[in-house]
Image (cartoon, coloured by chain):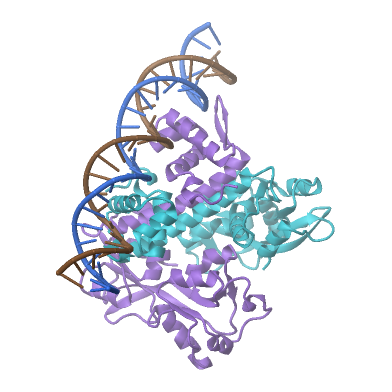
Chain colours: A cyan, B purple, C blue, D brown
Amino acid sequence: MSSDAPLSHRVPDLGALELLLAVARHGSLGRAAKETGITQPAASSRIRSMERQLGVALVDRSPRGSRLTDAGALVTDWARRIVEAAEAFDAGAQALRDRRDSRLRVAASMTIAEYLLPGWLIALRQARPGTAVSLLAGNSSAVAARLLGGEADLGFVEGLAVPEGLDGVVVAHDRLTVVTAPGHRWARRRGPVAPAEVAATPLILRERGSGTRQVLDSALAAHGGLAEPLLELASTTAVKAAAVSGAGPAVLSELAVAEELASRRLVEIPVEGVRLTRDLRAVWPTGPRPTGPARDLLALTRT
Amino acid sequence: MSSDAPLSHRVPDLGALELLLAVARHGSLGRAAKETGITQPAASSRIRSMERQLGVALVDRSPRGSRLTDAGALVTDWARRIVEAAEAFDAGAQALRDRRDSRLRVAASMTIAEYLLPGWLIALRQARPGTAVSLLAGNSSAVAARLLGGEADLGFVEGLAVPEGLDGVVVAHDRLTVVTAPGHRWARRRGPVAPAEVAATPLILRERGSGTRQVLDSALAAHGGLAEPLLELASTTAVKAAAVSGAGPAVLSELAVAEELASRRLVEIPVEGVRLTRDLRAVWPTGPRPTGPARDLLALTRT
DNA sequence: GCTGCTCATAAACCCAGCTTATGACGGCAT
DNA sequence: ATGCCGTCATAAGCTGGGTTTATGAGCAGC
């Protein structure tokens, strides 16, 4: 069994995966090579070594082209998901770097910067190629300060209200969900859990003062108020990790747990009659709507 | 602007991303290095070259450890998504390879193999480490044949009914959705579209005979029947690509378009009063429920 | 001040992947 | 048939990124 070496030794590198996608598109190693900016022998060798590494034949070579095998098609689909994640990474990283000479300066709260913005940036690049974007992530008041100080053209916040001095529109909704590891008592229950029981149970939470925590506090105030947390952690990731490992129930944005829910590493616990939604807003200094690149981005995010 | 070179030159490789995640976990380059199986200088150099590549400082070095910068935390979160996609790839690829001496032989339909199975395999590896799984992807009748021929221990199918000779349980639901590019006429409408209008409009579809097509045909038979397709394509991916590029409305599994919907490359068009759901089932030869590894996997997939 | 940890630097090494050059094979038109 | 186009494969040589080992330097706490 070959399953303890690091991932990077068992998964082909990004270049190889891109090449595989190009082969799937073009039906030819040579043309895929050209698109990827390498020579045909390099492509041939790279695909071959990928097949050796995976232990599976990926393409059927023939004198008039190369088509994917059945296994190859499946592998290619899985590869596409890695490449898409890499594209999101790249879009985000580029915005983080471009700081200075950017045409569009965005300030966003963490949740939005983490989960939504990379996708928007990819869409923006598609709609308006060449728009240089810079990104600054921070909490609501930091976003407001940047906008009012003229250091950002467009902001995104996730608070309950629009900060003083800003106008905004709702661009998406985020819902807080109660989640546990699949083995937890709540995960086995048939019906939903009562709000009062949630409030009375020690939970894994972000630290006091975080946006998540505020929404939760106010929603459960009517049901007896929150019990002392089981754990108070500084990042969404840490909360998620604790929940997955079975430490207890956690409350997290549905954006943060979508993947874990799909793969059943976490299970959503329905809570009776409580709506833990919060609005995600685009914001700008009070006055006319943004124009230029900011307007373009805004257009992409509207439902 | 540095945006035409291939992705692999602008995104750090998997090894570097894994190292970054390890640094985030351990708060120390040295310990991260050890976990990743390299030496401390190698880790130092690799993180440094990643910072150079991205043009952003990722970690704050201090004599008593290394913590992520704000930008570093964001980058790490994006990196985590790449690594998770790579883990799914690895789980799938390993199953594709292990063909022979496996303790659990799974046969699954394409949609399930593509979108759900890798996640299940990761969960299975976590719950029962060392279970060697082999995967064979094919349509419903191929899955049935494997099971009845004793060449597979557990199957997953997405048809309307359970194939002859098999027992099964529903493990998930899949819903077909009508989607268009954001610029399409239907995407701008306020309310839902009438089923009859969908039926009368030329759509981008999978070829006749595919599971998707069957469900759609039968659901819209009562509303005048499907018009001639605008395009008939052989793979989900091709349909998606055509829809994203604005060729017209397409009908696809919600599993297939989740990512595109989130990033607004596609928009879901609600259709009035038609439920295009189909059941995803685990199946096995008629008789007692599977035992052993198959039972373990089955347990993971139940809602 | 010593000892522990941290990270950085330097020099030598090694291998993966690249390029260029060439060959082999099959289809298709002449 | 023959020759030409495309396909992919093989071979030889180069290059560079990432690795190791060895060492140095900074700060903390006993």
Residue B195 vertical placement versus A210 (above, below)? below
Residue B159 vertical placement versus B5 (above, below)? below
Residue beneath the point at 58% across and 41% down: B72
Q: Is residue A179 left or right of residue A133?
A: left
Q: Is residue A165 left or right of residue C17?
A: right
Tag count in the figure? Answer: 0
The front one of A176 and B8 is B8
Residue beneath the point at 26% across and 56% down: B98
The front one of A21 and A33 is A33
The front one of A170 and A266 is A170
Residue B96 vertical placement versus B24 (above, below)? below
> Which x, y percent locates residue D8?
28, 58
Determine which quarter of the picture holds residue B279: bottom left
Residue beneath the point at 39% across and 68% down: B112
Asked if one can make out residue B117 in the rendered structure from this viewpoint, the answer is no
Residue beneath the point at 52% across and 82% down: B275
> Which x, y percent locates residue B22?
47, 39
Residue B107 vertical placement versus B102 (above, below)? below
Which of the image's four quarters has the C terminus of chain A?
bottom right
The front one of A143 and B189 is B189
Asked if one can make out residue A278 in the rendered structure from this viewpoint, the answer is yes
> Which x, y percent locates residue A58?
31, 60
> Which x, y percent locates residue A260?
49, 57
Q: Is residue B209 left or right of residue A261?
A: left
